[in-house]
Amino acid sequence: MRTSDVKIYGDIKLYGGNGNPELAARIAEYLGQKLSGRQIIEFPNENLLVKLDDSARGQDVYVLQSLCRPVHRNIMELLIMLQTLRLDSAGRITAVVPYLTYARSDKKDQPRVPITARLMADLIEVAGADRYMTLDLHAGQIQGFFSIPGDVLTAFHIITKYVEEIMPRMKDPVVVTADLGFAKKGRNFANDLGVPLALIEKRRSRSGDNTQALNLVGDVNGRDVILVDDEIDTAGSVSQAVSLLKREGCLDITLTCVHPVFSYPAVERLESAPIKEIICTDTIPIEDDIRHRLSDRLTVLSIAPLLGEVILRAHEGRSVGEMFNE
């Protein structure tokens, strides 16, 4: 056998946690595979046990887990699965985390507080991951918290393609970012769509749990607005932004984000806001009740083909950047 014919790692094996089982199933379907069997057992004291149904020795393993609600249960599932696979002598282990929790805690912005995003990176590495994949981190510098290689992807290519399809029905559309911190990504999004950009300046309270929209930089009067952010948590910033945009004379508002966190009272705010359409992805599963309440105003785009293709390219040692002409 020639050296070039020898695989460094074995075949792809996919394991899914309980964070987003629907997305894990879609990724497996894209790859033409089944999710590998595992048992996640919770004892009466809330301790967890992970047991693999078959051996992962020497295989190229991908653990699919979004760190959404219940956040700490899903974190522990991921970490225990990673360690289980390491102890089972998996050839290579990649943590595929579509939504990385604690990403907003990326710096010491006041005295005596942690940098929890760095802690999450350390935990994933120490638990046994050789690589990681994630989407649209809250801040780019979080990549530097990982000592292991990884792929930090963006779903805005998917959102851009969908928005391009509905833009012919818009009047003089303009992209608006919900805050100045998102200005760079917003500019790229606007450039891809070929429309102008406006910015909302806001100020966050010292505790970080309250914001106030202050000023609009740009013109939205008589235009349809594409309001863009990386995630919607309680929708406080969004509701304030929508009120400001309406006061400035905008027409219809289309809201886009990657991560639909939708913490309380997000749904109540989105229901009452004059938003024509809410576009997001399936990095986080959306409860049936929320889908029903937002009804036909909610459009969920799947990232499964994106993650599936990146997994395939990583397994085969091919460039991921080629997917985005990089």
Image (cartoon, grey):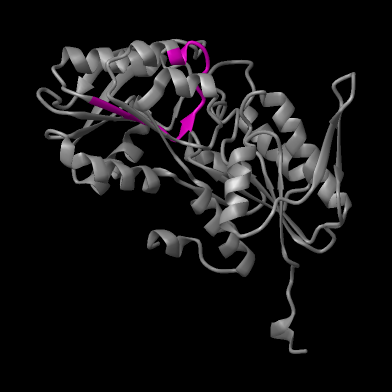
Q: Residue at x 65, y 38 (%)?
A: 21
Q: Is residue 264 visible?
A: yes
Q: Residue at x 69, y 84 (%)?
A: 4
Q: Residue furthest bottom?
A: 1
- Looking at the image, residue 206 sits to the left or right of residue 201; the answer is right
Q: Where is residue 260 in the image (x, y as percent from the top left)?
A: 48, 28
Of residue 301 and residue 117, the one placed in the foreground of this image is 301
Q: Position of residue 314 (x, y in %)?
A: 60, 62
Q: What stretch is highlighted in magenta?
A: 253-267
107 over 3 or under it: above or below: above
Q: Position of residue 254 (x, y in %)?
A: 28, 28
Of residue 8 and residue 183, the one placed in the foreground of this image is 8
Q: Quadrant of residue 249?
A: top left
Looking at the figure, which quarter contains the C terminus? Answer: bottom left
Q: Residue at x 61, y 60 (%)?
A: 32
Q: Can residue 203 be seen in this view?
A: no
